[in-house]
Amino acid sequence: MNDEMSPAERYAASRLRAAEQVTALAGFRELYDFGLDPFQIEACQALEAGKGVLVAAPTGSGKTIVGEFAVHLALREGRKCFYTTPIKALSNQKFTDLVKRYGAERVGLLTGDNSVNGDAPIVVMTTEVLRNMLYAGSQALDGLGYVVMDEVHYLSDRFRGAVWEEVIIHLPQSVTLVSLSATVSNAEEFGDWLDTVRGDTQVIVSEHRPVPLWQHVLAGRRMHDLFEEEQGTGPGTQRAVNPDLVRLARMENQRAFNGRDRRGGKMREADRERERRQQRRIWTPSRVEVIERLDAEGLLPAITFIFSRAGCESAVQQCLYAGLRLNNDENRAKVRAIVEERTKSIPDEDLNVLGYFEWLEGLERGIAAHHAGMLPTFKEVVEELFVKGLVKAVFATETLALGINMPARSVVLEKLVKWNGETHADVTPGEYTQLTGRAGRRGIDVEGHAVVLWQRGFDPAHLAGLAGTRTYPLRSSFKPSYNMAVNLVGQFGRHRSRELLETSFAQFQADRSVVGISRQVQRNEEGLEGYRSSMTCHLGDFDEYMSLRRQLKDREAELSRQGANQRRAAAADALEKLRPGDIIHVPAGKFAGLALVLDPGVPAGRSPAHHNRHDQFHHDGPRPLVLTAERQVKRLAQIDFPVPVEALDRMRIPKSFNPRSPQSRRDLASAMRSKAGTAGIAPQRQRRQRSAAADDTEIARLRTEIRAHPCHGCDDREDHARWAERYQRLQRDTKQLERRIEGRTNTIARTFDRICALLTDLGYLKGDQVTADGRRLARLYGELDLLASECLRDGVWDGLGPADLAACASALVYESRSADDALPPRLPSGNAKQALGEMVRIWGRLDALEEDHRINQAEGVGQREPDLGFAWAAHRWASGHGLDAVLRDADMPAGDFVRWTKQLIDVLGQIADAAPDASPVRRNARKAVDGLLRGVVAYSSVG
């Protein structure tokens, strides 16, 4: 290559290499035994040039290299770097990685329950910790040069996403921001916002996967490729679905619909044989069969995503019962040694409670579950063994896909539907990309494999859509909170705070969506001007004339509606008077003519008890069941009776009459016709009633004014009128668009104003001043920050001991997984029970106040109802009871218990900080923390 270059080109290249050698990037690259990808180099060069960066790249592509370069730059410049992550597990993992590289003395860790070397130049922390530092004006921010926000796409999370935006907005301008995101379709839009609030920000987007991903469908014994080969794999390439899969899906659908022949309803012998042959080819393989098949194909280690904790545990048990073994004796010994070392601090009695021995048996065989209900220590061990290749099959919930460095050769999805906490919903393209992104280990695997199991009703085109849509949009979930409001007003005053909130990504997106609508409004206004000139009349004000015509039309329509409603009401009243045996004439509809009423279709008595059972009668009016002259038994609707109907005669319906019997229908219809003929019954002609408009004084007045108007005599009157009608339609559309703009503009600021108004009513704010009560609220974070502050102010917790206080504080953090629990939660007795009741009463008062101020919980703003479901477990644990007894009473997995207890410890710490110095609440909150931080809670390093 050098031989082909001219001397000038060789000289320029050597100058470039010499310049690169003195950069920070050159020294950084020497730390790795592999070369950097182009997108990594581009991002690192932008950072070294003093720019902020947004890096959007697929899972497993190595975007954290850019974050590590920010750490390298900070140390080189003698400044600090904060590395933030969305979850504590990821913080712990990143802390371990950085300690290995830079040493324990230079790296710190700050999460809700861990504080290690917090003054170090490199500190790994959860995003909430940094947000709290910014509001508190922490001295730890001094000398801060870089902040890495890993998994920044988390700002779409509707529960926690606002924290990311708060940090981005409030970080000092001197801090360089490194944002690392999964591949999102609106990275440029997000980058534009970062450029607006943070200054010069370079957007680097890479859709290249370093390890190619192959998509498969496992149906029965056969592994089908999802796409046809040789169709290209570049971004935006449309790949054709494997025709074999399409054929299989079509055959299954035909089998479902054509299983019975039309004549006898029984399956023909040829169909049964075809069914048996087809079933031998297609079925949903069992979990054991899937792992055995992957093992035989050399596709382990694999992560199988099952969207259920119980399903993950059940999958491990199925593999154990089937005698599946993926480890040899040497690996079994390694597994046991690692597990015993990592769990040696857990007492034997707790190990029994935690199902340790069953868990160890699965690990020794190379099989494990991974979900949020597991003890954190157990999850850490599974992750470590998986990375070391000692666990080869993991059954996991989707929480594993969130950032934890645990790649596999293959990823298996059992179903493409999951429970989202409210309903069973389809997996989205973004979720599918996140889950399958774990497949393919860089530097180990040549290719990764995503396997979806065949299920009944499987649609290959739907799966191809998920697999082919690589990106998903980043949507802000930012909403102001009470804590945010007092912190902002305390630092900046209300006006400046309002301006800061207007810079949020949420408002940025809302304003951008308004741009297109505003352009449409401008085009409409230009059109209105043209229509106005076309409707101009030389004889007078045509707009005034059209207003009179419009008023006349509206009045006539109103009277017409009133008449129609009256006729419907009269017809319904007439139907309700019908009785079995009445002969009537059906005035309209498909079954118009003579008919005999068999059932009037009105619930007897119309009592409330009948109302629900016969709701359709009330909703649509009475629906009589009749026998027509043509011997048909039909249920009629009110639409068949546009005018009132009366009984023309009556006849007795024999008790032996069977509406299902053609003979019974024929005999009764014949008797009805005879009765009608003998009595000389003829259908009544409806007398045409005088129109209400004929006697309406308002209509008469408008018609007089219209005839007297000068424009009424214009020769081009109707031509002008057509232009005027177009003008009115376009004006109506324009007003609708303007209402949409108004609804999207300043939405965040309006919510902030409502929150400030409520806080002012409660005495937390006084103009631009934060009161003493407000300063207490500023130290309380979480969904129920205002409720906690009100409880402190009202002294609800003053007389409580440590265990009672722990029970009450648990209601501020706990949320049960099932929304509607059948039984009321068990509560501790005495003072704790009274205090919990008072907390619920205070919440009711706040809820009513929020309604008065139009603060809507459905929009993610406001105080949810406190959940008392963890109070008994928290009280028992804080009182010193054993793990076995507490978990048995709580009916809760150990992992959930540890997670909620750690969140409870965090909120108790906030309560202790917010309570007055001499307050018994401060003292007892700290004692409660000491009582809770023991056993499994104390030795679980990951929250």
Image (cartoon, helix red, strand yellow):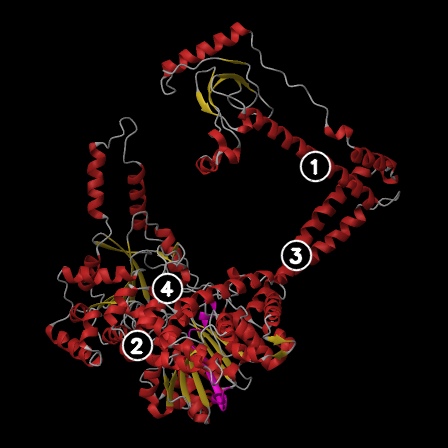
Q: Earlier in the sequence, mark 1 or mark 4?
A: 1
Name the mark nearer the viewer: 4 or 3: 4
CA separation in Å, label 4 and label 3? 43 Å
The answer to if 546 sits in the magenta stretch is no
Q: Earlier in the sequence, mark 3 or mark 2?
A: 3
Name the mark nearer the viewer: 3 or 2: 2
Magenta region: which residues? 138-158
Q: Earlier in the sequence, mark 4 or mark 2?
A: 4
Secondary structure of the residue carrying tag 2 is: helix
Residue type indicated by callout 4: Gly
CA separation in Å, label 2 and label 1? 70 Å
Residue type indicated by callout 1: Glu
Q: Earlier in the sequence, mark 4 or mark 3?
A: 3
- Is 563 situated above or below 150? above
Name the mark nearer the viewer: 4 or 2: 4
Name the mark nearer the viewer: 1 or 4: 4
Q: Position of residue 212 (x, y in %)?
A: 33, 67
Q: Is residue 932 visible?
A: yes
Q: Position of residue 631 (x, y in %)?
A: 43, 16
When asked about the image quadrant of residue 669, the answer is top left
Residue type indicated by callout 3: Arg
- Is 79 situated above or below 83? below
CA separation in Å, label 1 and label 4? 55 Å
- Which residue is found at the position 57% from the left and 60% from the top? 851
- Residue position for label 1: 558
Residue furthest top in the image: 678
Secondary structure of the residue carrying tag 4 is: loop
- Which residue is found at the position 56% from the left and 72% from the top? 504
Q: Along the line of sight, which residue is nearer the eye, 111 or 253?
A: 111
- Residue position for label 3: 739
- Residue position for label 2: 937
